Image (cartoon, rainbow, N blue to C red):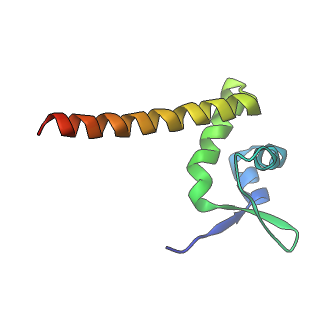
Amino acid sequence: METRYIKITEFCENEKIETSFLLELNREGLLRLEKQEEVEYIDQNDLPQIEMFARWHYELGVNLEGIDAMRHMLERMKEMQKQIQILEKKLQI
């Protein structure tokens, strides 16, 4: 699968968010930016997560620490759901 990168300035302009928000996400390790010739890009595969983080931040007023905590909780919930499915399959045998 080919990876397509999008300039963060273009993405931010289209989505009406600040580039500093993406730079802060990158600094906190919540997002990985690619840098080529002094221009920073995001991987298009990261768009759903970036959009979710932006909603949390701009619509709900969640700060970066809160975004990280919520992201971690969602990951744990997904892991737990997988474990539940495995256990349910074992019980059906």
For the C terminus, which image quadrant?
top left
Farthest residue, direction right: 38
From the viewer's side, name the closer residue of 48 and 71.
71
From the viewer's side, name the closer residue of 2 and 65.
65
From the viewer's side, name the closer residue of 24 and 52.
24
Residue 55 point in image, percent of width and height: 64, 35
Farthest residue, direction left: 93
- Quick check: 54 above or below 26? above
Relative to 40, 3 lies left or right: left
Relative to 19, 74 lies left or right: left
- Quick check: 14 above or below 39? above
From the viewer's side, name the closer residue of 30 and 43.
30
- Quick check: 11 above or below 52? below
The answer to which quarter of the image holds residue 34 is bottom right
Q: Residue at x 52, y 38 (%)?
A: 75
Q: Residue at x 84, y 46 (%)?
A: 20
Residue 22 point in image, percent of width and height: 77, 48
Say how many tags the image has: 0
Residue 84 point in image, percent of width and height: 32, 33
Q: Residue at x 88, y 69 (%)?
A: 38
